[in-house]
Image: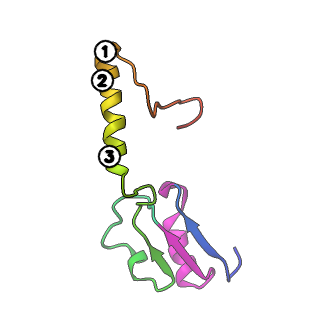
Amino acid sequence: MKEKAIFLNMGRGKTVDEQALIKALKENEIKHAVLDVFQEEPLSKNSALWDLDNCTLTPHLSGIFSTYLDLAFNIFERNLQSYLNDGSLVENVIDPERGY
């Protein structure tokens, strides 16, 4: 990456070599990092990432909105009712072929 690059990881923590990233930030090989996922969550209190001025840590909350809990509980209730009726789920069903 260029020295002026800003690294953003909002995906999966295990896809980033945190020690290499810490080294790159300490040595100013990249300008900044913005992270909301980590190899281990929650991020250890001892992680060097906490102390780096050129690193922004944000909570992993991008999907939460004002009616999130109502929606989540409605989905859970419909899935539970369907499961109790015939053993199937009707919403947010995982498809291993698609990877999610």
Dot 1: few (<14), some (14–19), or many (≥20) neighbours within 10 Å? Answer: few
Q: In this view, does 7 lie to the left or right of 18?
A: right
Residue of label 3: 70
Residue of label 1: 85
Identity, as a three-letter code, of the amino acid under mark 2? Gln
Mark sitting on residue 81: 2
Identity, as a three-letter code, of the amino acid under mark 3? Asp
Q: Which range is magenta?
A: 12-35
Q: In this view, does 84 lie to the left or right of 11?
A: left
Earlier in the chain: of badge 3 and badge 2, it is 3
Q: Which of 86 and 47 is in front in this view?
A: 86
**Real-space CA distance between mark 3 and mark 1, rounded to the nearest whole angstrom:** 23 Å
**Real-space CA distance between mark 3 and mark 2, rounded to the nearest whole angstrom:** 16 Å
Identity, as a three-letter code, of the amino acid under mark 1? Asn
**Real-space CA distance between mark 2 and mark 1, rounded to the nearest whole angstrom:** 6 Å
The location of residue 20, given as percent across then percent down, is: 55, 70
Quadrant hosting residue 97: top right
Regarding mark 2 in the picture, which secondary structure is present there?
helix
